[in-house]
Amino acid sequence: MSKIVVIGAGPAGCSAGYHLSKSGHQVTLIDKQSFPRDKVCGDGISFKSVQALFPMGIYPQDIKRLMPEFAPIDGLLLGVSNGSYNLHNTELEGYCIPRFAFDNLLYERAINAGCIALTQSITNLDRHPELYSDFDYIIDARGVSAGDVDAIAIRAYWSIKSEDFEPYLSKAQIYFDKILGINGYGWIFPADTKSGLVKLNVGVGIWMDEYQKMNTNIIRLFDQFIQRNDRTKELLSKIVAKHKPKVYPLATAKKGNKVSNGKILRIGDAANLTDSLTGEGIANAILSGLYVAQAINMSTTLDLAAQNWQRLYQAYFEEEIRAGLRIKSLRKYSFMNNMLIWLMKRNHRVAEQVTHAIVGVVPYNELLPSFRH
Ligand SMILES: Cc1cc2nc3c(=O)[nH]c(=O)nc-3n(C[C@H](O)[C@H](O)[C@H](O)COP(=O)(O)OP(=O)(O)OC[C@H]3O[C@@H](n4cnc5c(N)ncnc54)[C@H](O)[C@@H]3O)c2cc1C
């Protein structure tokens, strides 16, 4: 049995804490906030995230118990700024759950598995020599604050009356509006459904390289997106309550990530594991917690654990990250978004493949070859 400290109790840290405790290790799970806590997010729990939860003993029925703090997503609508869009219905399990509720479910699993919870902020690990002396392994799961920020996003909650709820609002809507540059996008996801109101998560995300070229800020971009997009304009007229939008950075995936520095094993956003194409990070965060636990379980020393975690990262994440980056680079041609919607409208199989790739059922590597058939 080893003594392990996990710093950060988001999806990555809770997953690592859960699996390591279940394997018989003594795990201390530290977070700067006490739970339940909010996290700025699109709240989209994709099919890949749903699957990633199974090893933690969390199944769709457990998620559904979070009612009314969840909404099922039953399709994906991809749209471009000229009003053209493709809607693909799907029966894949996918949800929109405010992170306040979702992360708490994972946190409870980790604590019930045996993790010792501590509320403390650890900003600079090197200023805490006790971590190195008291624990055999240190896992950094502090999210984007420990990763390399390369994107920025803003999220707002809008409530409309249930009677104004249109069926298309139960889809995850993603818009490549021109105002957001070549790789940015705006979203409308359904969130919870309580007390006669439907809460929608509306936001915009943009990669830093693009954002820095624009003479604007993210709040202004969000306003412009709302004013120019037909769906958001329509929703705006129905809003009965809205929260002040919140801005938050992202640490998306890069080629050749180093997921440990020898002494510290990094997971989730702290290791830049968010999907570089979609900005979706929950699935990889949860999976990285599982694999880092496996790396520790198959090792006798810290050095071996670091090597094994890097190997598991190579085996399970690197190829998909590279394929995502290849597709992202294709989007630098501005006609690509329009062409994608055009193709999806005309070809059901393409629409299904793209939808399934976005929710994590079809690997990116298989997406481009599938267009040829
Ligand atoms: C606006 C926005 C929208 C997004 N939408 C989606 C989406 O719809 N679907 C999706 O899958 N992903 C989405 N993501 C990405 C997703 O939020 C992250 O990839 C995911 O939360 C990463 O999980 P994590 O456990 O690595 O980090 P986090 O969830 O960020 O957890 C990190 C934890 O570490 C704690 N912590 C931080 N610093 C310290 C410290 N110094 N000391 C102690 N504790 C600390 C924090 O309090 C937090 O609890 C979005 C991100 C943004 C910004």
Image (cartoon, rainbow, N blue to C red):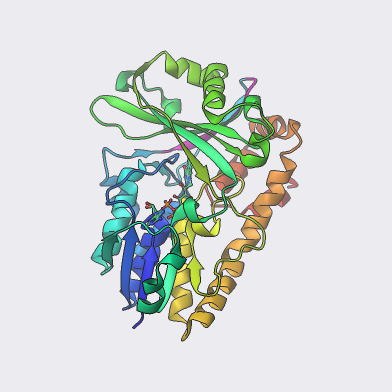
Q: Which residues are magenta?
A: 73-82
Residue 11 x, y percent position in the rendering = 40, 56
- Residue at image location 38% in from the left, 15% down from the top: 238
Q: Residue at x 34, y 66 (%)?
A: 18
Q: Is residue 45 left or right of residue 277?
A: left
- Going by the image, does 232 lie left or right of 59? right
Q: Is residue 126 left or right of residue 105?
A: right
Q: Quadrant of the N terminus?
A: bottom left
Q: Is residue 280 left or right of residue 331?
A: left
| The quadrant where residue 20 appears | bottom left
Q: Main secondary structure of the magenta part?
A: strand
| The quarter of the displayed image where residue 246 is located | top left
Is residue 48 at least partly visible in the picture?
Answer: no
Q: Residue furthest top?
A: 237
Residue in the foreground of this view, choosing between 78 and 9: 9
Residue 58 spot, x, y in % from top left: 33, 58
